[in-house]
Amino acid sequence: MATNRDFMWNQQIKGARFRRIDGGEPDARWKNSPGVLWTALVAHDPTLRKIFLGNHDPAGWGGLAVTPWFLAREAAARPRG
């Protein structure tokens, strides 16, 4: 978690950007998104969850895959009763 949150992330919730894990220059093919939020960690870190919620686009390509997972996770975490 710390690698994605403390090293790769630009420390901005809105407009969050991530650099490559090795800190190197981005490949020309992915110059606008050299690194990404590791969504699997969202369930385990409140800061990464804030980043996710502040930037998630359910209508985008990434949203098509992650939105159902996230909604199911949120529903399972809600108290019943």
Image (spheres, rainbow, N blue to C red):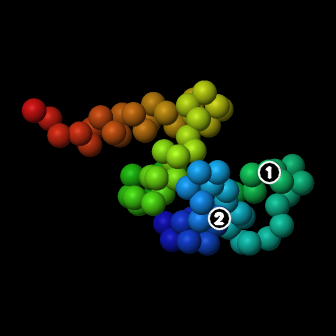
Which residue appears at 35% of the width and 40% of the height? 73
Percent position of residue 71, x then y: 39, 34
Disc 2: CA contacts within 10 A as few (<14), some (14-19) or many (>=20): few
Classify residue 38 by image quadrant: bottom right
Can you identify the residue that label 2 sits on? 10
Q: Secondary structure at mark 1?
A: loop
Percent position of residue 50, x then y: 46, 53
How far apart, in angstroms, are the residues tagged by discs 1 and 2?
13 Å
Can you identify the residue that label 1 sits on? 32
Going from N to C along the chain, the mark reached first, 1 or 2, is: 2
Asked if residue 46 lies left or right of residue 18, the reply is: left
Percent position of residue 13, x then y: 55, 55
Classify residue 8 by image quadrant: bottom right
Which residue appears at 59% of the width and 51% of the height? 14
Which residue appears at 49% of the width and 33% of the height? 67
Percent position of residue 20, x then y: 72, 64
Q: Secondary structure at mark 2?
A: loop
Asked if residue 20 lies left or right of residue 66, the reply is: right
